[in-house]
Image (tube, grey):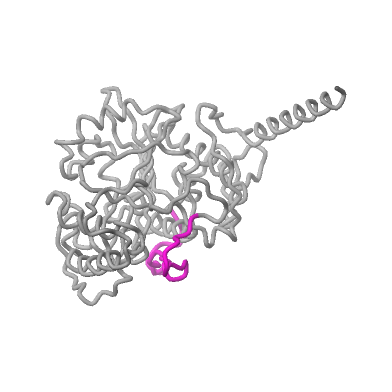
C-alpha cells in the first residue's frame, strides 16, 4: 500500500512539473492563445535542418475539377521547415529590400491582424522548433533564430511593421484577409516575396476576393458563391491546407520562367528542345488558411516547393497524372497555368517515364488514370516522422542530386539600407 501511494505521488508530481513547464514556455507579454491548438515540439537542430526534407507533396488529380480542394491541417505543419529555409529567408529579404512595398504592404485597418499574426508565428515557432528558435528574454519579445543567427527584437513599441519581423522568422509568404462591415472579405495586408508570376501586392490591397481571383478560370462559375461563404464560416482552431502546381524549368521564386512573358499568357519565347530532363520541374504552391482569434482575420500562407519530374519517376501513376492534366484539363486552365509553354518538352519526358513504369510493372496498362489514395502526398508518405524528415525511397534519389536553390541576386542591384 505504501509503495502504491509512493507511485501515485511520483506520477502526480511529474504531471504538475510538466504542466508548469508547459505554462512557463507559453508565458509571454504577447496575448495568450489558449483557443489555438498547440503544435507538438520536434527537436530538429540547425545541423539536421541542413538535410531535412518536408512532406512530399503530389497534388496531381484526375479528373481535374476547379475546386478549393482543401483538407484539414495538422497545426504541426502550419509552418513547415526544410533544408531550403536559409535560402528562402535570404531571398525574401532581398526581394523586400529591392522592391519594397510592391511586395510587402498593408492598409491601416490591418494593424491588429498583423500584430496578432506576428505573435502567433513567434509562439508557434518557439513551441514547434525549440532547437531552431529560442527566447532571449522572459516575455519572448526578443527571440534568436538559431539557423540564421538573427536576433529579432519585437519589444514594444515596434521599430518596424509586424510583417517585417514575420519575414525574418517564417519562410512562407502571407496574405491577411479581413471581413468588413459589408460582410465581405478583402485583402488588407501582404508580405509576398515569391508569387511566381512576378506580380506585386500593392494594387491588390483593399480588393475583394472576387477581384483578386478574377483571372482564375471558372472562378465565377465554380467558386465565387461558395468561397465567400466558406471564408465567413472558417473557425478559429480549424486550419486547412491545399496545394496548386505548374510546370517550369528553373527554381526562380519571384518570377518563374514560364511566366517571364507575363502571367497567364499561354506562350513563351523560349526554345526548350535542348533542355535536359532533370531541368523540368513541378513548382508546387503549398497553402494554408487559418483564422486568428483576437482580430478575426484570416491568414493565407504560401510556400513554394520544387520537385524534379525525374525524382518522381518511381512513383506509381505520377507521370501519367501530370501528362493527363497538362494535355486534357479544361483549356482555360491549361492556358492559365501556361502549360503550352513546356508541354511538348514535358510530354517527351513523361512518355518515357510512363513506358518505364509499364516495363517495370509499376503500373498496369489497363489501369485507369486516377487520383492516388494518398493525395495530395506521395504514395510513400508517412504520418509519424522524426528529426530526419521525409526521404524519397526512389531507386536513383539522392539529396545531393535533387537539390534546388533559389537564383541568387546580384547584390549590387539592391539597396544596402534595408527596407
Displayed quadrant of residue 363? bottom left
Displayed quadrant of residue 126? top right
In the image, is 164 to the left or to the right of 313?
right
Residue 300 location (% of width, % of height): 36, 40
Q: Residue furthest bottom?
A: 274
Q: Measuring 36% from the left and 28% from the top, which residue is drawn there?
A: 234
Question: Visible in this render: residue 104?
Answer: no
In the image, is 394 to the left or to the right of 204?
right
Q: State yes or no: residue 154 in magenta.
A: no
Q: Quadrant of the N terminus?
A: top right
Q: Measuring 20% from the left and 54% from the top, which residue is drawn there?
A: 325
Q: State yes or no: residue 410 in magenta.
A: yes
Give 183 or 83, whichever is nearer the viewer: 83
Total marks in image? 0
Give 202 or 79, whichever is nearer the viewer: 79
Q: Measuring 29% from the left and 40% from the top, which residue is drawn there?
A: 69
* Main secondary structure found in the magenta portion: loop
Residue 178 location (% of width, % of height): 34, 31
Displayed quadrant of residue 306? bottom left
Residue 252 location (% of width, % of height): 34, 63
Magenta segment: 390-419
Amino acid at each position: 500500500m505504501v509503495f502504491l501511494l509512493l507511485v501515485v505521488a511520483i506520477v502526480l508530481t511529474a504531471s504538475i512539473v510538466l504542466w508548469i513547464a508547459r505554462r512557463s514556455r507559453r508565458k509571454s507579454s504577447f496575448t495568450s492563445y489558449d483557443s489555438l491548438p498547440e503544435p507538438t515540439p520536434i527537436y530538429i537542430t540547425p545541423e539536421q535542418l541542413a538535410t531535412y526534407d518536408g512532406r512530399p507533396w503530389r497534388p496531381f488529380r484526375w479528373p481535374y475539377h476547379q475546386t478549393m480542394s482543401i483538407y484539414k491541417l495538422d497545426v504541426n505543419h502550419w509552418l513547415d521547415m526544410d533544408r531550403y529555409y536559409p535560402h528562402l529567408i535570404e531571398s525574401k529579404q532581398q526581394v523586400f529590400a529591392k522592391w519594397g512595398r510592391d511586395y510587402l504592404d498593408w492598409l491601416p485597418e490591418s494593424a491588429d491582424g498583423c500584430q496578432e499574426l506576428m505573435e502567433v508565428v513567434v509562439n508557434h515557432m518557439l513551441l514547434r522548433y525549440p532547437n531552431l528558435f529560442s527566447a532571449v528574454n522572459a516575455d519572448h519579445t526578443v527571440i534568436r533564430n538559431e539557423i540564421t543567427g538573427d536576433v529579432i527584437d519585437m519589444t514594444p513599441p515596434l521599430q518596424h511593421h509586424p510583417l517585417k519581423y514575420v519575414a525574418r522568422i517564417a519562410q512562407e509568404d502571407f496574405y491577411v484577409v479581413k471581413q468588413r462591415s459589408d460582410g465581405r472579405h478583402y485583402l488588407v495586408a501582404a508580405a509576398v516575396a515569391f508569387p511566381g508570376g512576378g506580380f506585386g501586392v500593392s494594387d491588390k490591397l483593399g480588393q475583394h476576393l472576387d477581384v483578386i481571383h478574377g483571372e482564375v478560370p471558372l472562378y465565377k462559375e465554380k467558386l465565387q458563391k461558395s468561397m465567400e461563404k466558406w471564408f465567413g464560416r472558417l473557425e478559429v482552431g480549424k486550419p486547412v491546407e491545399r496545394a496548386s502546381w505548374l510546370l517550369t524549368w528553373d527554381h526562380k521564386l519571384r518570377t518563374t520562367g514560364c511566366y517571364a512573358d507575363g502571367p497567364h499568357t499561354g506562350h513563351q519565347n523560349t526554345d526548350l528542345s535542348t533542355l535536359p530532363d532533370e531541368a523540368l520541374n513541378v513548382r508546387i504552391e503549398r497553402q494554408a488558411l487559418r483564422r486568428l482569434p483576437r482580430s478575426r482575420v484570416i491568414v493565407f500562407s504560401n510556400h513554394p516547393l520544387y520537385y524534379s519530374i525525374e525524382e518522381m519517376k518511381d512513383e506509381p501513376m505520377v507521370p501519367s497524372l501530370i501528362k493527363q492534366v497538362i494535355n486534357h484539363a479544361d483549356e482555360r486552365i491549361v492556358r492559365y497555368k501556361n502549360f503550352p509553354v513546356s508541354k511538348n518538352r514535358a510530354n517527351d519526358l513523361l512518355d518515357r517515364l510512363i513506358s518505364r513504369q509499364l516495363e517495370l510493372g509499376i503500373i498496369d496498362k489497363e489501369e485507369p488514370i486516377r487520383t492516388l489514395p494518398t493525395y495530395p502526398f506521395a504514395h510513400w508518405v508517412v504520418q509519424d516522422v522524426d528529426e530526419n524528415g521525409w526521404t524519397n525511397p526512389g531507386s536513383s534519389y539522392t539529396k545531393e542530386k535533387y537539390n534546388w536553390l533559389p537564383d541568387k541576386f546580384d547584390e549590387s542591384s539592391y539597396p544596402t539600407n534595408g527596407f
